[in-house]
C-alpha cells in the first residue's frame, strides 16, 4: 500500500485525469476530456475568451508604454492565463490582489476548493453557459457518459485543468519572450513574419496564426505508476512503482539534436519531428495514452499570446539587464518556470488596439 501523496489529498483521492490509476475510470474521464471537453471544436469555441483576455492585457501594456515604464511580464502572463482558464471552466475571472496581480499559483488549489465547495452544481444544469463545468453536467444529464461522476470526480477533473493549464501556458510564453530577448536576431525574424502576415490590422487574429511558420518552431513529466511488473532497458520494474520520466534529458540528447542547450528555433524548420507525441525525441505534452489532452487548448493560447505580444510591441530589457546577463535560472519544480520575474520594457507600435 503506497503512502498518500499530495496528489491523493489535493485531487480527491487521485480522481483526476493526471494521477488516476490506469483503470476503467481513467479511461472514461480521458475519453470525456478528449472527445467532449477539449476537442478541436470546443477549443475553437473558446477563442472569444482568448481574444478578450489578450486584448485586456495588450491595453494594460500600452498604458505602461505611455508612462515609459517597464512591466513585470511574469505577473502579467500569469493573470491572462489564469483568466482564460477561469472563464473557460467556470465563466468567471480569477481574483486579483490589491496590486491588480493574480493570486500566486501555490494558493490556487485552496481557492478553487472554496469555489467548488460553494458552487451549486445543480444550478449548472439550468445554465445556458457553455463553460466546461456546464458541459460536463449537461453530458451527464443527457446520459452521454458511461460512468456517473460524483461531485468529487468533477472537482478533481476541473482542478486538473487549472493546475495543468495556467502555469504551463504562462511559463511557456515567458520563456519564449526571454529567449527572444536574448537572441535579437530570432526576435526580429519572428516579428517580421508576424507583421507581414497580419499587415496593418490592429491585432493578430486566429486565422493569421496558421500562416506563420516561425511561430511554430517549436522537464519531468507527471509521475506514473506501473500497473504490472515490466522490463525496461534490461531493468525489472516492479508493479506499483512510482516512475518519473525525465523529459528534460530526453529532449536534450546530442544524438538527436545539434547543440541541444542552445536556443535555435530554426532547428524545427522543415523538420518532420513534431510535439504531438509521435516522436520520442520531443515530448513536451507526453506520449501515448497518458499524453496531455489539453494540447490543442494550450497551443492555441500560447501561440495567440506570443503573436500579439511581438506584433503590437517592440521589447527591450529593463533594470540594467542585457542579453548576456539576463538571469535564466530555473527552480526545481514540476513546471519549469523562471526563478526571477521577467521585467521588460514595451514600446508600442499602435496608439489603439
Image: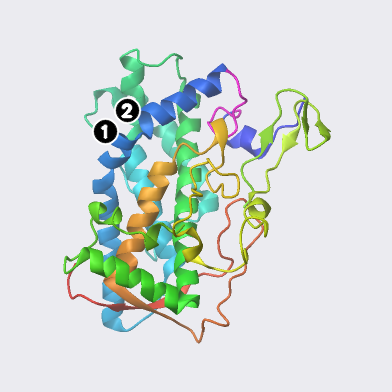
Q: Nearest the camera: 193 or 148?
A: 193
- Report the label total: 2
Badge 1, how many Cα within 10 Å: few under 14, some, many 20+?
some
Specify whether residue 11 is in view: no
Specify whether residue 141 is in view: yes
Q: What element carries label 1?
A: loop
* Apparent side of residue 107 relative to residue 101 in the rendered image (left or right): right
Q: Is residue 21 above or below residue 322?
A: above
Q: What element carries label 2?
A: helix
According to the image, label 1 marks what residue?
A: 130
User: Residue furthest toward the bottom?
Assistant: 320
Q: Which of marks 1 and 2 is nearer the N terminus?
A: 1
* Apparent side of residue 12 relative to residue 204 in the rendered image (left or right): right
Q: How far apart are marks 1 and 2 (CA)?
A: 6 Å
Q: What stretch is highlighted in magenta?
A: 13-23
Q: Can you say which quadrant of the picture contains the C terminus?
A: bottom left
According to the image, label 2 marks what residue?
A: 135
The answer to which quarter of the image holds residue 135 is top left
Q: Which residue is drawn at 24% across and 52% down?
A: 207
- Specify the principal SS of the magenta part: loop
Q: Residue at x 45, y 50 (%)?
A: 166
The percent coordinates of residue 61 (x first, y second) are 31, 71
Badge 2, how many Cα within 10 Å: few under 14, some, many 20+?
some
Tags 1 and 2 touching, CB below 8 Å: yes
Amino acid at each position: 500500500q503506497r503512502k498518500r501523496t499530495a496528489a491523493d489529498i489535493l485531487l480527491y483521492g487521485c480522481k483526476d485525469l493526471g494521477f488516476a490509476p490506469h483503470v476503467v475510470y481513467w479511461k472514461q474521464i480521458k475519453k470525456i476530456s478528449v472527445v467532449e471537453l477539449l476537442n478541436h471544436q470546443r477549443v475553437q469555441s473558446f477563442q472569444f475568451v482568448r481574444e478578450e483576455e489578450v486584448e485586456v492585457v495588450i491595453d494594460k501594456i500600452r498604458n505602461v508604454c505611455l508612462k515609459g515604464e517597464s512591466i513585470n511580464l511574469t505577473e502579467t502572463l500569469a493573470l491572462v492565463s489564469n483568466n482564460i482558464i477561469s472563464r473557460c471552466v467556470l465563466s468567471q475571472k480569477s481574483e486579483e490582489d490589491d496590486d491588480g496581480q493574480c493570486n500566486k499559483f501555490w494558493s490556487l488549489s485552496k481557492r478553487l476548493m472554496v469555489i467548488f465547495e460553494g458552487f451549486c452544481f445543480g444550478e449548472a444544469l439550468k445554465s445556458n453557459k457553455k463553460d466546461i463545468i456546464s458541459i460536463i453536467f449537461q453530458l451527464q444529464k443527457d446520459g452521454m457518459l458511461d460512468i456517473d461522476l460524483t461531485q468529487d470526480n468533477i472537482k478533481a477533473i476541473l482542478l486538473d485543468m487549472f493546475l495543468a493549464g495556467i502555469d504551463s501556458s504562462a511559463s511557456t510564453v515567458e520563456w519564449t519572450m526571454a529567449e527572444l530577448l536574448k537572441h535579437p536576431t530570432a526576435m526580429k525574424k519572428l516579428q517580421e513574419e508576424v507583421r507581414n502576415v497580419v499587415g496593418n490590422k490592429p491585432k493578430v487574429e486566429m486565422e493569421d496564426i496558421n500562416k506563420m511558420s516561425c511561430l511554430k518552431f517549436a522537464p519531468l513529466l507527471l509521475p506514473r505508476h506501473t500497473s504490472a511488473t515490466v522490463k525496461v532497458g534490461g531493468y525489472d520494474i516492479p508493479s506499483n512503482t512510482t516512475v518519473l520520466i525525465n523529459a528534460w534529458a530526453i529532449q536534450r540528447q546530442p544524438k538527436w539534436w545539434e547543440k541541444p542547450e542552445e536556443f535555435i528555433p530554426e532547428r524545427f524548420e522543415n523538420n518532420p519531428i513534431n510535439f504531438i507525441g509521435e516522436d520520442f525525441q520531443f515530448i513536451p505534452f507526453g506520449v501515448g495514452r497518458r499524453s496531455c489532452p489539453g494540447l490543442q487548448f494550450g497551443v492555441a493560447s500560447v501561440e495567440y499570446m506570443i503573436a500579439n505580444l511581438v506584433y503590437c510591441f517592440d521589447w527591450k530589457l529593463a533594470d540594467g539587464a542585457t542579453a548576456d546577463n539576463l538571469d535564466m535560472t530555473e527552480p526545481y519544480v514540476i513546471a519549469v518556470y523562471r526563478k526571477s520575474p521577467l521585467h521588460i520594457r514595451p514600446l508600442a507600435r499602435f496608439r489603439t488596439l
